[in-house]
Amino acid sequence: MRAGAAARHLALGAAVLAAIGASWPAFAFSLTALLPPEMLEARGWLLGVRIGLVGAVAAYLLARWTLVRDAGAMSLLGLLGTVLAFDMAAQDQIALLKIPDFAHLGRLSLFVGVLVPVSAIFFARRYMRLERLRPRLNAALRGVEAILGAAGAVAAIVVPELAAPVLLAIWLGVSGLGFVVLAALAVRGVRRAELVLVAWLPVVGGALFAQSTGGAASGSGLLVAALADGGLIFGLLYYTLLVRIDSGAALRMGSQGRVSDLASDRSETATLSWDMRGDRITYSKGARQLLGLEPSLAEQTTEEGTGSWFERLHPADRELVVAAIENARARRREVFSLDFRIADEGGRGWRWLRFEGRTFIGPDREAARCVATVEDVTLEKQAEERRIRDLVRDPVTGLSSRAVFLQRLQRLTERVEDTPAGEAAAAFTVLLLDIDRFHALNDSLGPEGGDAVLAGVAARMEDILGGGALCARYGDDRIVALMPDIRHEGEVQGLAEAISAAIARPYAIGRREISVTAGISALIVGRAPGDVADLMADLETVLLRGKLSGPGAIVVERRADAAPAADAGRPDQNLRRALERDELELHYQPIFRAADGTLAGFESLLRWRHPERGLMSPGSFITLAEETGLIGDIGRYVLFEAARQLAAWQGRKGIGSDEPLFVSVNVSSLQLLGRGLVTDVRDALRRHALEPGTLKLELTESQVLTDPHGAARLLEEIRNLGAGLALDDFGTGYASLATLKRLPFDTVKIDRSFVAGLAKGEDSARAIVRAVVDLAHDLNLAVVAEGAEDAESARMLRDYGCDYVQGYAVGRPVPAHEAERFLTADPRRALA
């Protein structure tokens, strides 16, 4: 295909050259026959015609360079100018200009003659833009230009007797080798190479003509001049034709690009369109705003465009952006995505932007246009950074995360098992602290107050154990510590008692003083510690055995003594019996409409009413349920019980709003991975005949992003059954605009950490809440704000456009029979 295009262009150029070659010499011979000999001898009229012709050509090429910055036009002007200068010097017509200093410069024709092939090389590499597409070849050709120019100057000035053969050799070598190189580049796909191949024909013809004539004989001066002028005319005509061919090849792409530019500029979508052929960048209104450009600036050259915002790039990202631009130019990547930082308008911080685009290939198989969307992903990047921090550090207590603790414990157990038989085992101790009745404390103080108590307990525990121990948050109300090289029961007992005494001191929470106790269990582990999961299960067993003795119990045992005497003490058996004995129950936290305060629905929250420990939150046993395979049975119980209760409420008369109530149900990651979830949802909806979309399943960002494509198919199937879908804790993970577009959610829930920031007056929290609300509404999603802990927060959330409000300020989680009072409550008091 490439060779065919080159052949067509070569044939077309040859036809143009043949037409000029046939007509122009005939015109020249006619002039020779018709004009008087004295006029022909003077040749002044011919100089005027030639200067006029060159002036017209120069005016056209200069106008094209001025309007579209066409480098090919300027390089062609240089080539045609050197051809004319050489011919005039060879014909001694420079003397006719009446310039004394140049009246007799016979050597000038020799030096200018060398500039003809040099200018031809310059035109070829500039028009093909080798400086971008083939930088090494371009550098080599620039070196050839310098060498040829120096050789011509030396030959003309130092050894003029050798100048003519040197000039002829240079012409023949450049024309022949240039033709071969251009043909090879055209076949290999270098941009415009086949077009330049045709333009190279006059260079080849000129070299052959110079060899045949050996210069300009006096009797054929007019013929030589006429042929030179014919070369000028050919160059102008062919370059005009070449421009039309090159631009026409991309006409459809260019017109589509202009339509795209116009459409994007009239929309709020942030896009930019880069015309690589014309070296122009067009910005939409949204892109100008994100890149910090002037509102009136719609288009720039490539150099101006990158320069206008390149200086504001983060220093660490500049090379990345430059590489992406060069890759797009060289067509190394047709589809790309690029994240980088750019200074905000005040220069005080950095914003993350994302370019997602595509390079469109023209009919010549070279990059012609690049279109990209620009998106501000600062919130997504901040959430990603928080999530990475949370993987290693708990945000509430500042302790290490559960994952870090388990990883460290795994390495320590492996080290102990690898201890040679003749050496003493490197024993260690694992200590688990569980705050007594923490759920009731959380209900009393609210989540923020409960977090403050938990952080205080963690700080005092770290103070006691010192830097040699690794402390980590292990659950909602649990802290675990790994203490290497501590192996004596007396030492462990003393540390546990010191921790118990320290955390028993009152905590100042607002204007209240709160006192807590905690159960503490410790296992001293020696040789052959075994599997980490088994070790932690044994530690849980010791803790539960201590709980039977009452609040604040301390139990320290060696691992060999830790095996339970009967299954009755094992946590998994207790949890299984809880299912059988109906010890699990649902509490319901009300969700109100922000606009008028009417009740919209409830979030169902699982609780375990333990015979000894009292009411326990899911954080105390969900992990155990997942590890023992009980999560499926528990999840099915929650789904069916929530559907049963919702059907009962929907059947009641006299509820404040005409819209049906909804109840949301939290879904575990393991439930999402199993096919049983679809069956359970279908059975629950059929059994209770609920209003469509009112039984809502809540999932977190991390759950759906584990397998986005699989989750999308599963959630679409669930939605088609008639269930609603809510994205929980939005803003704390990786979810972005693209995630929300792909997945069939109807509701997003703003994480309580952002809502808490509103009460503290944090500007960042206000900006995040506004951004999430605007984004959700643009996608026709409802917004629920969790964590409204006071009336002021609830009012602010309503003012920011949230659709629903949930939190301790408007209603605490209560059993179903107590939730009845919300059904008939005065809506004016809900958000008062």
Image (cartoon, helix red, strand yellow):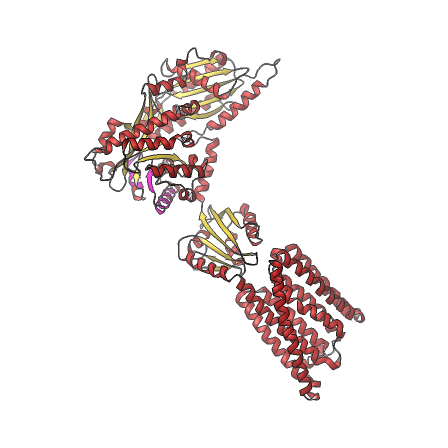
Residue 720 at x, y percent in the picture: 35, 39
Q: Is residue 773 magenta?
A: yes
Please tell me in which quadrant of the rendered image residue 632 appears. Answer: top left
Q: Judge whether residue 811 can be spotted in this image.
A: no
* Main SS, magenta residues: helix
Please tell me in which quadrant of the rendered image residue 780 appears. Answer: top left
Residue 805 at x, y percent in the picture: 30, 38
724 or 414: nearer the eye?
Answer: 724
Residue 161 at x, y percent in the picture: 81, 71
Q: What is the number of callouts on the image?
A: 0
Quarter placement of the N terminus: bottom right
**Residue projecting furthest to the left:** 654
Q: Judge whether residue 348 can be spotted in this image.
A: yes
Q: Is residue 113 above or below residue 412?
A: below
630 or 475: nearer the eye?
Answer: 630
**Relative to 520, is 74 on the left or the right?**
right
Q: Is residue 605 above or below residue 290?
A: above
Please tell me in which quadrant of the rendered image residue 542 appears. Answer: top left
Q: Is residue 2 magenta?
A: no
Quarter placement of the C terminus: top left
Range shown magenta: 768-797
Q: Is residue 658 above or below residue 286?
A: above
Residue 65 at x, y percent in the picture: 56, 67
At x 62%, y 70%, the residue is 77
